[in-house]
Amino acid sequence: MSKIKITYINSAIDRKYDQKATIKALGFTKLNQTVEHEATPQILGMVKKVGHLLKVVN
């Protein structure tokens, strides 16, 4: 599987609880943090759900 790098660029303040939980599940704890994940369907679905808060680099 290929890996994707995801950067948390917009705050989850005033967002729905499920979006905040998705950000936490992806491993983010603060803004401008970058994490690397395998490009599985589960991860890609989470990224799609909160894509407006993230920046994705393949």
Image (cartoon, rainbow, N blue to C red):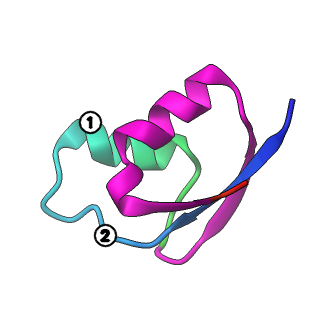
Amino acid type assigned to the residue bearing label 2 in the image: Ser
Q: In the image, is 1 to the left or to the right of 38?
A: right
Q: Position of residue 4 (x, y in %)?
A: 73, 49
In which quadrant of the rendered image does the N terminus lie? top right
Above or below 28: residue 22: above
Amino acid type assigned to the residue bearing label 1 in the image: Asp
Question: Which residue is drawn at the image coordinates 48% and 71% (left, top)?
Answer: 30
Q: State the mark number for residue 18.
A: 1
Determine whether label 1 and label 2 are within 8 Å by CB: no
- Location of residue 3 (image quadrant): top right
Provide the secondary structure element on which disc 1 rests: helix
In which quadrant of the rendered image does the C terminus lie? bottom right
Q: Position of residue 10 (x, y in %)?
A: 35, 71
Above or below 37: residue 46: above
Q: Position of residue 48 (x, y in %)?
A: 43, 39
Q: Where is residue 49 in the image (x, y as percent from the top left)?
A: 36, 38
**Viewer-closest of 6 and 28:** 6
Give the magenta-colored segment's residue range. Answer: 31-56
- Location of residue 42 (image quadrant): top right
**Viewer-closest of 13 and 52:** 52
